[in-house]
Amino acid sequence: MNSNRLFGALEKVFVVSALFLFSGGLLTLVRQMTGAISDLNQTDPVSQAVFLLVYAITACLVMVWRKRFTSVVTRDTLLWLLIGIALLSVLWSAAPEVTLRRGIALIGTTLLGVYVAMRYGQREQLQLLAWALGIGALLSLLFTLAVPAYGIMEEPQAQGWRGVYTHKNALGRNMALGALIFMILALSERRYRWVSWAGFGLSIILLLLSNSITGLVIFLVLLPLLPLFRATRWPYTLAVPFLIAAVLLLGSLALWGVAHEGTVLGFFNRDVTLTGRTVVWPAVFDMIWERPWLGYGYQAFWLGWDGPSSYVLIVTDFDPLSAHSGYLDLWLNLGLLGVVVFAFGFLRAAIRAIYRVRSTKIDEGLWPSAYLTYMLLYNITESAILARNSISWVLYVIVVLSMPRDRAKPSKGLTTSVSPSFEDQGRVTR
């Protein structure tokens, strides 16, 4: 093996390891098991050192492949405007030192997404993600079977497998994402297709064992949406009526679900408070109206009794780590300004994703639309927008920066060949 191939192989090992780490796998759980940390709010010097090492290696790799850096990062100015607001929020933050420290972590997290977007094409991105989440699935299965006392949660409000993750919802979230990726790869590839289907099957099994309703619902919603994304490739005379009918059908089902929320939640064995979320949200809105325009600063709100979140703790008798809504947390952090910038950036990315579907014939072209939908749904009850050390934010950055600004134009309403500007982005020279 020559030096270039060895370097390329080591790069992939690093990316898979970093994605697994950012998925929340193993590190934090091991630190909890050994008693090094007692809760997720506690500062852990070892974990901080590991993440700083990942940031440093990522920065070095970005320098190695710097020839494509400018062309990639300039594909979405709204993304950088949002990050810029987060960093500038140290000026009005309720806890400036926290915002500064966590802002550095946000830069490092975002930089990993930039590196993957500028280094690899979409198929390689999906394969690397499949490796990272597949390792998480396999380790979760083995770990839980070997050490069930740690691998299974038995708390009154949280019962289910968590595997090598800190919470059952983390396992469910990652397995829902893994099942989606493995399915897209299985539909797109011919070689080793059985491996992708095996990964899909294992992910579904662990998703069910996790008892994570959020992950399960998101996956069940995405399944019928994939054919809808495919339908955008049809001629307009067929696609428009089909999509209108599908939207009306899905909208009717959603309205029925809202009208019969007790029945729906009872089917999933959940109460109408969504495990306490609807109790916390009114108190969160009370605090949003206190500083509606710019918020409390990036990640400067949820500091327990030492921060503005003390009001939520008093009026709800809960001790949440977040608002359990990415949109509410974004509003708390960066105010309405941050919400508007993110909304416009997300909308533009969604439009580009639809053009991406229409410009390809292969099913992996569905990935940007599928992930943006996943991100949209996930942030209703969980928080992943601008989340530091989070695979969800890394993937958002990858998806947004991997789509070229120019829109491919399908001929006669059908599909065209794959856009070279997208698929060739991983084949660059140093």
Image (cartoon, rainbow, N blue to C red):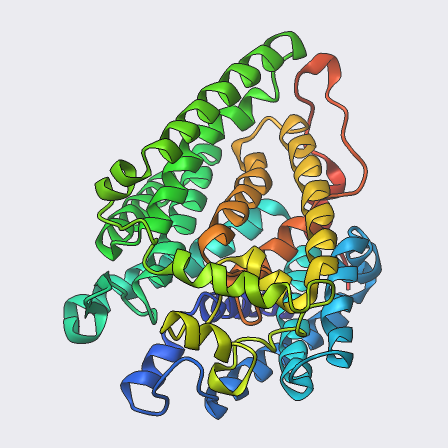
Query: Would residue 8 be seen by someone viewing this image from the given angle?
Result: no
| In this view, 48 is above or below 54 | below
Choose top left, top right, bottom left or bottom right for residue 193.
Answer: top left
Q: Is residue 176 left or right of residue 158?
A: right
What residue is shown at x 42% (from left), y 43% (from top)?
180
Q: Is residue 64 left or right of residue 188?
A: right
Choose top left, top right, bottom left or bottom right for residue 29.
Answer: bottom left
Locate the C terminus and report the quarter of the image it occupies.
bottom right
Q: Is residue 267 left or right of residue 24?
A: left
Residue 7 is situated, as x and y percent measured from the top left of the image, at 61, 69
What residue is shown at x 29% (from left), y 89% (from top)?
34
Locate the N terminus and report the quarter of the image it occupies.
bottom right
What residue is shown at x 63% (from left), y 61% (from top)?
331
Residue 316 is situated, as x and y percent measured from the top left of the image, at 39, 69
| Viewer-side residue, 345 vs 416 | 345
Q: Is residue 146 left or right of residue 243?
A: left
Residue 307 is situated, as x and y percent measured from the top left of the image, at 55, 83
